[in-house]
Image (tube, rainbow, N blue to C red):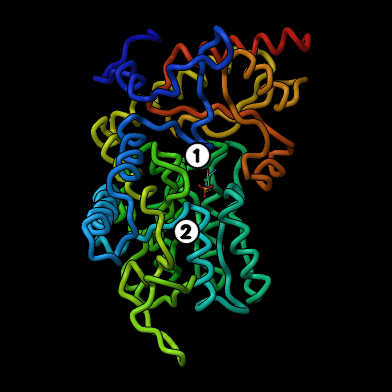
Amino acid sequence: MNKNAFLYDYDVEKVRADFPILQQEHHAGVPLVYLDNAASSQKPLPVIAALDDYYRRYNANVHRGIHKLSEEATAAYEDARLKVKRFINAGSKREVIFTRGTTESINLVAQTWGRANLGRGDVVVATMMEHHSNIVPWQILAAEKGFTIRYVPVLRDGTLDLRAYDRYLHEENVKLVTVMHTSNMLGTVNPVQAMAQQAHNAGAVVVVDGAQSTPHMPVDMQALNVDFFAFSGHKMCGPTGIGVLYGKRALLEAMPPWMGGGDMISRVTLEGSTWNELPYKFEAGTPIIAGAIGLGYAIDYLSAVGMEKIQAHEREIGAYALERLAEVPGVTVYGPEAGQKGAVAAFTLQGIHAHDVAQILDAEGVAVRAGHHCAMPLHDHFGIPATARASFYLYNTMAEVDALIAGLYKAKQAFAV
Ligand code: PMP
């Protein structure tokens, strides 16, 4: 493969110039090669500027004040909601609830829809590849409500055992299916549209963890036709502390609120309270105003670059990374082949612990993550305690893949393996 020739129009150097953090040296004389994007992405200038502008110029609480600053803050906050609605093609702004992130979004569904609808004799279907944030909230609720959780196994090639999934739907009293769109460890892109259709045929509600898909590919709520969809701003060029729960309006209307407090009420008396309309029913207290505005600018940025182009760029980088990793003796990469997965490579290097691999790479300026990546059951399933993970995004280059590979050879040399 010609490392510099892209078959499509994508100027990665122009993109990189928008990310100040990428311009710095990691250590003296060593440039930063940031390959920890599955954990969190870097932020482009327009997002940083939007946060600065909000705090400098129109910081105020929303939905309350009648003064100019509050009106401007409210308009910007609600404009961000509209941007999210368009970005994911939700049916209405009312279906877009701002949360702190994927974790909070899933907990919200568990504590509202789940608490109201799940009980003894019911089954929740999750998968063995889920992030802890899509396992633990259901376990907490199951301990209280007495329902059962079934986990769809993962096959050796890193895809889901869809035959087992089908069996669960036919043989068990499945009330809810919860599945990740893209795996943060294997990179597997699950067929959530087809899985949702099957679940609906069985009368189950569908929750999708979109934390690793929304930043990297176009996602369309009408096409996927799932009931709930969760994602985080910080993985898609936005600030930390902001995320989204999309939910179908009819379900959200029927659900009780989760957290109580200001903004989520219509009327409060000492005897009881009534709830605000959607989406405010689920946004108790002062919301994450700057975070939402920043996410809106991140969406503008990603949209201007183009989600299809980002996806195509990552396909090239991901395929090149897998090709180069396969050349390194002792490296095992987990998950499907290139073309079937996101630009994520979780791997082991024989004879060297993942943490040591990451430490040596860090000395070379290459930032990767090492550990279980909040997917302990998946690591148990593959019989490994930890992996090192390189994950790519719109600003990564082929040369950075080469830097990763050079770092791995350094590690092998240092450990004489
Ligand atoms: N699901 C997946 C697949 C993830 O990768 C992550 C982040 N590591 C989460 C959920 C949790 O996201 P957050 O920490 O932003 O709530």
Q: CA distance from mark 2 to mark 1?
A: 22 Å
* Residue type marked 2: Ser
Q: Residue at x 62, y 73 (%)?
A: 147
Q: Residue at x 50, y 77 (%)?
A: 117
> Residue 398 occupies which quadrant of the picture?
top left
- Please name which of the two marks, 2 or 1, marks the residue nearer to the observer: 2
Residue 91, image quadrant: bottom left
- Residue type highlighted by circle 1: Thr
Quick one: SS at disc 1?
loop
Q: Foreground residue, 351 or 112?
A: 112
> Measured along the vertical axis of the image, is residue 307 above or below residue 244?
above
**Is 279 or 1 nearer to us in this picture?**
279
Q: With respect to residue 220, does 148 lie above or below?
A: below
Which residue is denoted by mark 2 in the rendering?
105
Identify the secondary structure beneath mark 2: helix
Spot occupied by residue 250 in the image (x, y as percentages of width and height): 32, 73
Whether disc 2's CB lies below 8 Å from ligand 1 is answered yes
Q: Residue at image x 47%, y 17%?
A: 24
> Which sits earlier in the primary sequence, circle 2 or circle 1?
2
Front residue of 414/273: it is: 273
Give the residue displayed 33% in from the left and 80% down from the top: 266
Name the spot of residue 171 as percent of width and height, x first. Answer: 56, 69
Residue 123 position, x and y percent, is 58, 70
Q: Which residue is mark 1?
A: 188
Residue 4 x, y percent position in the rendering: 36, 9
Structural crowding at the residue carrying mark 1, measured as other residues with C-alpha within 10 Å and reported as few (<14), some (14–19) or many (≥20):
many
Is residue 307 at least partly visible in the picture?
Answer: no
Disc number at residue 341? none
Q: Is residue 401 left or right of residue 80?
A: right
